[in-house]
Amino acid sequence: QESINARQGVLFFMCILQTMGPIINTVQAFCLEKSIVMRERQTRSYSLGMYYITAFVSTIPIQIIFPVIFGCILYWIVGLNILFERFVWFLVITVLTNFAAIGLGFLCGCGAPSVEAATTIAQTVVALMILFSGFFIHVESLPIWLQWLTYISVIRWAFMAFMINEFDGETGFQCDSKLLSSCFQTGDEVL
């Protein structure tokens, strides 16, 4: 039972790491380039979509290599599910979370007048995604008018994907006799 809580915590921490770093890096880089992009866009050198695609594609090697290295180390150190297929899915989810955070970084950078403002907006967005991820506050206990925020939380979607990858179909959890009332015996019960 302790291993379930530990793995949930590690998976949630992974979601935060794979969101916070890329969103802040993207915001800071984009805000520095924004004036150049706007000037070249006014002269019709290239479209905004083309800038976004090239900026994203140019960072793909870095945005894949580092999360994969970190994921490879973390996965085996903390003792997550030993099936190789689950390990590969863990890496895929990690990289996709990273990509989603890059997109959010561009979004935050677009709406801010300065690097400082964009960084503050990005940090606020990440804090809200953490709050509405379902890890600290269950979605059902939120006021109905706030529940829609859970659907736009990248961290919530990543955490759910990690949890399904880790626990779906698993059996054989050991129960402590003191905690029998809140004991999970299968991965589906954990989910």
Image (cartoon, rainbow, N blue to C red):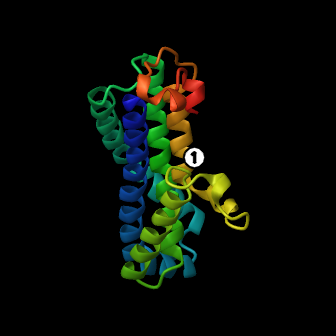
Q: How many marks?
A: 1
Residue 160 placement, left or right of 79: right
Outermost residue toward the front in this view: 178
Q: Quadrant of residue 181?
A: top right
Residue 16 placement, left or right of 78: right
Quadrant (top left/top right/bottom left/bottom right) for the C terminus: top right
Residue occupied by mark 1 = 157
The residue lying toward the viewer, choosing from 119 and 133, is 133
Horizontal and vertical percent position of residue 82: 39, 18
Q: Residue at x 48, y 14 (%)?
A: 172
Quadrant (top left/top right/bottom left/bottom right) for the N terminus: top left
Give the SS element for disc 1: helix
Outermost residue toward the right in this view: 144
Horizontal and vertical percent position of residue 144: 73, 63
The residue lying toward the viewer, choosing from 182 and 76, is 182
Q: Residue at x 35, y 42 (%)?
A: 67
Outermost residue toward the bottom in this view: 113
Visible in this render: residue 151? no
The residue lying toward the viewer, choosing from 59 and 81, is 81
The relative height of residue 172 versus residue 73 in the rendered view (above or below) is above
Amino acid of disc 1: Trp
Residue 191 placement, left or right of 11: right
Horizontal and vertical percent position of residue 149: 64, 62
Horizontal and vertical percent position of residue 123: 42, 69
Visible in this render: residue 115? yes
**How busy is the neighbourhood of tag 1: few (under 14 within 10 Å), some, or many (20 plus)?**
some
Q: Residue at x 58, y 75 (%)?
A: 44
Q: Residue at x 42, y 81 (%)?
A: 117
